[in-house]
Amino acid sequence: MNTKIAEWRPDLFEECCKKHGKTAEELFPKSSYQLMHIVLFPHDIIHAENLGGEIDKVLNRRLKVGIFPWKFFGGESAFCRIVAFDENA
């Protein structure tokens, strides 16, 4: 929520603050804005956003994850398919 989502979906931002019983500044200090982009990317640490589908089927499980981005010229981020592989199944 400490991203542009606060501007794009103020309803969800407000709901999150109510759920946790804290102010926006307590939960998401301005000093941490887009922290995952600003601090981690220069160290080649990436992340995936907006995962959906059947993600609740793999919560709290140790899995191998494959990320298969859409290849396009000059792109720095891409749509991708993310697949969880359960080696114990």
Image (cartoon, rainbow, N blue to C red):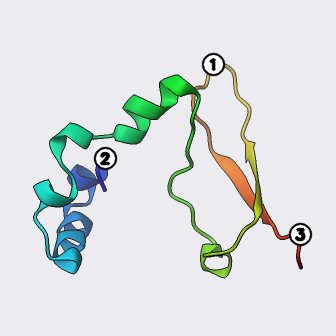
Q: Residues within 10 Å of mark 2 (few under 14, many from 20)?
A: some
Label 2: which secondary element: loop
Q: Quadrant of residue 24?
A: bottom left
- Is 38 displayed left or right of 79 in the figure? left
- Estimate the spatial distance between the alpha carbons at disc 2 and disc 1, rounded to whole Å: 24 Å
Name the residue type under label 1: Gly
Mark toward the start of the polypeptide (3 vs 2): 2
Label 3: which secondary element: loop
28 is higher (above) or lower (below) than 88? above
Measured from the top left, where is residue 52 in percent x and y?
57, 67
**Between tags 2 and 1, which lies in front?**
2
The residue wearing badge 2 is 3
The residue wearing badge 1 is 74
The residue wearing badge 3 is 87
Name the residue type under label 3: Glu
Mark toward the start of the polypeptide (2 vs 1): 2
Measured from the top left, where is residue 36 in percent x and y?
42, 40
Q: Residues within 10 Å of mark 1 (few under 14, many from 20)?
A: few
Q: Nearer the viewer, residue 14 or 39?
A: 39
Q: Residue at x 55, y 45 (%)?
A: 47
Q: Quadrant of residue 46?
A: top right
- Discs 3, 2 touching: Cβ within 8 Å: no
Measured from the top left, where is residue 30 in percent x and y?
17, 42
**Between tags 3 and 1, which lies in front?**
3
Measured from the top left, where is residue 22 in percent x and y?
13, 69
